[in-house]
Image: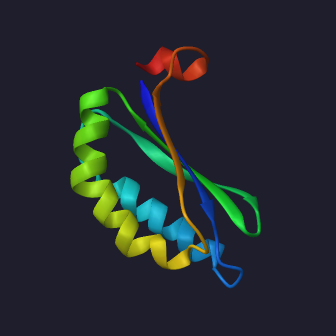
Amino acid sequence: MHAIVNHLQIRPDAEWSELAGKFDAFNKAIDHPDFGGGCLIRTDDRQGIILVLYKTREALDEISKNVGAPWFAEHIRPFMAGPVSRSIGEIVGGALTASA
């Protein structure tokens, strides 16, 4: 399993329910066997974390470049108050490794 973790600075006037709906739509739109799903974690009113899982690094690279990046720019960037801090890595321990 591989993951993308994005730390977001969210605008103070952002509607979290609208953001949540965008993630639900994103998950439904991805039809790839190695896509593990994405979620939005609200850490406080002005910050969030995006976690997106993939079974393989190849799927991560393909989906994030061809689908995720354009989708993010169109649907999430307007809600942001600052830059994204992004990390990508292999999941090497914990419960998520069981579904690999």
Residue drawn 33% across the image and 55% down it: 68
Quarter holding the N terminus is top left
x%, y% of residue 72?
Answer: 39, 64
92, above or below 46, in the image: above
Please identify the quadrant where the C terminus is shown: top left
Q: Kindly identify the residue that appears in the image at 31 percent across and 26 percent down.
A: 56
Q: Position of residue 66 (x, y in %)?
A: 21, 53
Horizontal and vertical percent for residue 50?
Answer: 55, 51
Q: Is residue 2 left or right of residue 10?
A: left
Q: Is residue 55 above or below residue 61?
A: above
- Splitting the image into 4 quarters, where does residue 94 fall? top right
Q: Is residue 30 depicted above or below 87 in this figure?
A: below
Residue in the foreground of this view, choosing between 46 and 35: 46
Extreme residue in the bottom direction? 13
Q: Quadrant of residue 43?
A: bottom right
Nearer-the-camera pick, 78 or 33: 78
Q: Quick check: 24 left or right of 59? A: right
- Is residue 68 left or right of 42 when viewed as pictured? left
In the picture as drawn, the residue positioned furthest to the right comes out as 44
Could you tell me which residue is drawn at 65 percent across and 58 percent down? 48
Which residue is depicted at the point 50% across and 15% down? 98
Counting from the top left corner in percent of width and height, residue 39 is at: 54, 50
Whether 32 is drawn above or below 70: the answer is above
Is 11 situated left or right of 63 in this image? Answer: right
